[in-house]
Image (cartoon, rainbow, N blue to C red):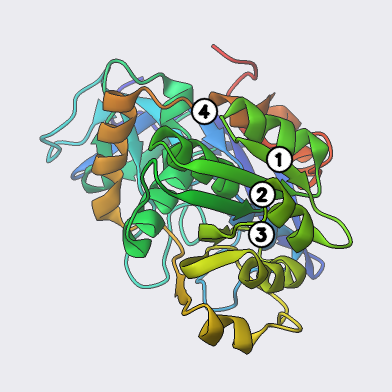
């Protein structure tokens, strides 16, 4: 296939708006030409993000500019197969990943076609080289880890002297488990899913607490009655947001990362004042944090591959999306052109 060959077709996972609802299917699309400073990339892995599920199942923030139909996928790793005439940093054979920020609330894989296709186009300026020691599967997990590294820097970091409680063991929460544990902190993971708590344990969580009727008491019991120095709320669930304030030590930090769609009830303002808490929030991974995240993976060997519970083929995209919604049996769900880990 040459740079200008548009006669070929490619498989792609496409989101359609039909009859007032959204559907997802694996379609055949033309292969567009590579122009300017664009790269044509063959994906190795493409992750299903929580924002993908929100988009498809009706909870997407209306401020995002979404176009239909579009090819899904903004968490990816791949190999360059062709470069446009103005591309200068990458050549065919290079392994790359890319951020998704196109400016404003315009995003790769949401506002434009994304990475769930046999090949896709991406601006070279959005891409980063994958170090040789970082596998393509680890590289495809950089986006949630980059969100966590950005958030942790916002919150002032942790070290081996800190205790961290993490509410919510989706991709963000589990990435934070791996990150904070790699920095030496004592980590308590909290979730309703025993499956995801098992993943947290594999990533090094010192204690795993199944959320229930009195989650805060269970967390404090795991901590020996002492509060956490940093509490990360990564679920967006109102009950967890409220409980996050209850498990804090004096002068602790509470970091809200989970996207909330409903107001938290019974939040204790007294706890904020009495314990001199600092409340912070962080969402997303700005472009400047991606290279530090890749360096962290390269230098520390942090391996988040236990997050990946399934790898589906593009043709099985509907099953992949349903699996990603099911926290009882799945954690991070990936797609690759033909499925399976390589």
- First in residue order: circle 1 vs circle 3: 1
Alpha carbons under labels 3 and 4: distance apart: 25 Å
Q: Residue placed at 69% from the left, 37% from the top?
A: 331
Image quarter in which the C terminus is found:
top right
Image quarter in which the N terminus is found:
top left
What residue is shown with label 3? Answer: 235
Instruction: Classify residue 208 by image quadrant.
Output: top right
Marks 4,1: beta carbons within 8 A: no
- First in residue order: circle 2 vs circle 4: 4
- First in residue order: circle 4 vs circle 1: 4
Alpha carbons under labels 2 and 4: distance apart: 41 Å
Q: Is 172 situated above or below 269?
A: above
In this picture, residue 221 sits left or right of residue 123: right
Alpha carbons under labels 2 and 3: distance apart: 24 Å
Q: Secondary structure at mark 2?
A: loop
Q: Is 30 situated above or below 246?
A: above
What residue is shown with label 2? Answer: 224
Tag shown at residue 208: 1
Q: Is residue 71 visible?
A: no
Q: Residues within 10 Å of mark 1 (few under 14, many from 20)?
A: many
Q: Percent position (x, y) of residue 24?
A: 72, 48
Q: Secondary structure at mark 1?
A: strand
- First in residue order: circle 3 vs circle 4: 4
Instruction: Classify residue 183 by image quadrant.
Output: top left
Q: Residue placed at 46% from the left, 80% from the top?
A: 276
Alpha carbons under labels 2 and 1: distance apart: 14 Å
What residue is shown with label 4? Answer: 45
């Amino acid at each position: 296939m040459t740079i200008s060959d548009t006669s070929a077709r490619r498989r792609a996972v496409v989101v359609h708006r039909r009859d007032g609802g959204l559907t997802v299917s694996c379609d055949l699309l033309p292969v567009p030409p590579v122009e300017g400073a664009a790269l044509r990339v063959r994906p190795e892995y493409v992750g299903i993000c929580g924002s993908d599920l929100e988009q498809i199942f009706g909870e997407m923030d209306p401020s995002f500019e979404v176009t239909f139909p579009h090819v899904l996928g903004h968490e990816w790793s791949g190999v360059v197969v062709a470069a446009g005439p103005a591309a200068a940093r990458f050549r065919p054979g290079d392994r790359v990943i890319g951020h998704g920020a196109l400016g404003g609330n315009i995003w790769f894989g949401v506002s434009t076609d994304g990475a769930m296709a046999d090949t896709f186009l991406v601006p070279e300026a959005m891409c980063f080289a994958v170090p040789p020691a970082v596998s393509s599967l680890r590289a495809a997990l950089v986006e949630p880890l980059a969100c966590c590294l950005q958030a942790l820097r916002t919150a002032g970091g942790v070290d081996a002297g800190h205790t961290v409680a993490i509410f919510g063991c989706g991709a963000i929460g589990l990435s934070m488990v791996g990150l904070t544990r790699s920095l030496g902190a004592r980590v308590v993971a909290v979730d309703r899913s025993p499956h995801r708590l098992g993943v947290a344990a594999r990533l090094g969580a010192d204690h795993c607490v199944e959320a229930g009727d009195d989650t805060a008491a269970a967390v404090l019991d795991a901590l020996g009655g002492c509060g956490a120095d940093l509490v990360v709320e990564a679920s967006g669930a109102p009950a967890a947001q409220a409980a996050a304030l209850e498990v804090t030590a004096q002068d602790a930090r509470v970091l809200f990362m989970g996207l909330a769609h409903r107001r938290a009830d019974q939040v204790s303002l007294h706890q904020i004042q009495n314990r001199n808490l600092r409340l912070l929030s962080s969402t997303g991974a700005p472009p400047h944090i991606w290279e530090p995240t890749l360096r962290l993976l390269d230098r520390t060997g942090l391996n988040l591959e236990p997050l990946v519970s399934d790898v589906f083929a593009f043709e099985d995209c509907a099953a992949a999306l349903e699996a990603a919604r099911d926290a009882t049996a799945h954690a991070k769900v990936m797609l690759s052109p033909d499925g399976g880990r390589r």
